[in-house]
Amino acid sequence: MKVQSREISKSMLSSKAYQNQITSKERLIQDNLKIVYQVVNKLSFLKPAGLDEEDLISCGIIGLIEAASKYEEKKGHNFASFAYLRVKGSIVDQLRLSDVLSRSARKRVKILTGCIRELEQELGQMPTDEEIANKLEISLVTLHSIQKEASLSVLSLDLNTDDESENTLLEQISDQKSGPEENCENKMFQEALEAAVDELPAREKLIIGLYHYRHFTMKRIANILQVSESRACQLHNRGITLLKVRLDKFLA
């Protein structure tokens, strides 16, 4: 009887510990749901037609659940920072699977970047949107649409230098586990990225910095620049497109 009682008691303790673990994770998820809405709000300007905000929220919650499952407090990670990256990665994956990145979209982006290179050689400077549209014989509205596609195609190029980042190109190239050849290529990419950002026109450079480095929303950036939110989005997409032209050999 005593042996059986001990076995029953042990079973009950194990069950209780398991329930506490589940409750702890659930609490972690509930307490950090706001992160999902923050990321959705930050990326909403890239949402293609046909993809509802609720879809992005659902993907974000999946990322949050995964973060809670993989999070280990003993490693010293701040959960909010850890979860933010997981949530963002989950939403970005959904955006990448959308129609925006179809084969035809990639072809349009390739034509656009080639056009920009040609104009830069002809003009000796970065072309304006009007010059690009004229060269391609398309409207500004169509150009802005393609620039949005270009922006989405390199969405993982997040210029955040947070050491806890696991999903961005900048973090990947900073991985100390890389071999000598990879480290050399990573250094080349870092130098090319810094130079490309530095060469951007003033407004595009400011927006890239505020959005990717300081995590400002487009609405906040628009207020700072005293332009509409849609115009701020256009300038961001133009900036990313110009970066893509400079970094295509690394992003291919």
Image: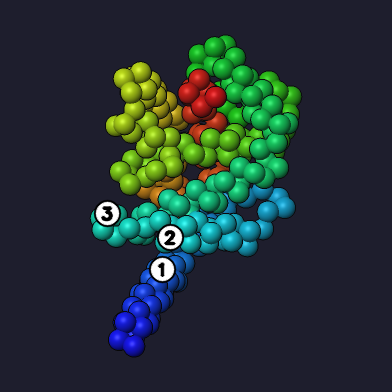
Amino acid bearing label 2: Ser
Dot label at residue 173: none
Question: Which of the pair 111/207 is nearer the observer?
Answer: 111
Question: Is residue 219 visible to the viewer in this orientation of the structure?
Answer: no
Question: Is residue 151 visible to the viewer in this orientation of the structure?
Answer: yes
Q: Secondary structure at mark 3?
A: helix
Q: What colour scheme was applied to this rendering of the protein?
A: rainbow
Q: In the rendered image of this protein, does residue 163 appear above or below residue 188?
A: below
Q: Quadrant of the N terminus?
A: bottom left
Amino acid bearing label 1: Lys
Crowding near pointer 2: few (<14 within 10 Å), some, many (20+)? some
- Spot occupied by residue 138 in the image (x, y as percentages of width and height): 73, 29
Residue 26 lies in quadrant: bottom left
The alpha-carbon separation of the residues under discs 3 and 2 comes to 14 Å
Dot label at residue 69: 2
Quick check: marks 1 and 2 in contact, CB under 8 Å?
A: yes
Amino acid bearing label 3: Lys
* Left or right of 119 on screen, residue 36: left
The alpha-carbon separation of the residues under discs 3 and 1 comes to 16 Å
* Left or right of 110 on screen, residue 159: left
Crowding near pointer 1: few (<14 within 10 Å), some, many (20+)? some
Q: Residue at x 61, y 19 (%)?
A: 114
Crowding near pointer 3: few (<14 within 10 Å), some, many (20+)? few
Question: Which of the pair 141/7 is nearer the observer?
Answer: 7
Question: Which residue position is annotated with label 3?
Answer: 75
Question: Which residue position is annotated with label 1?
Answer: 25
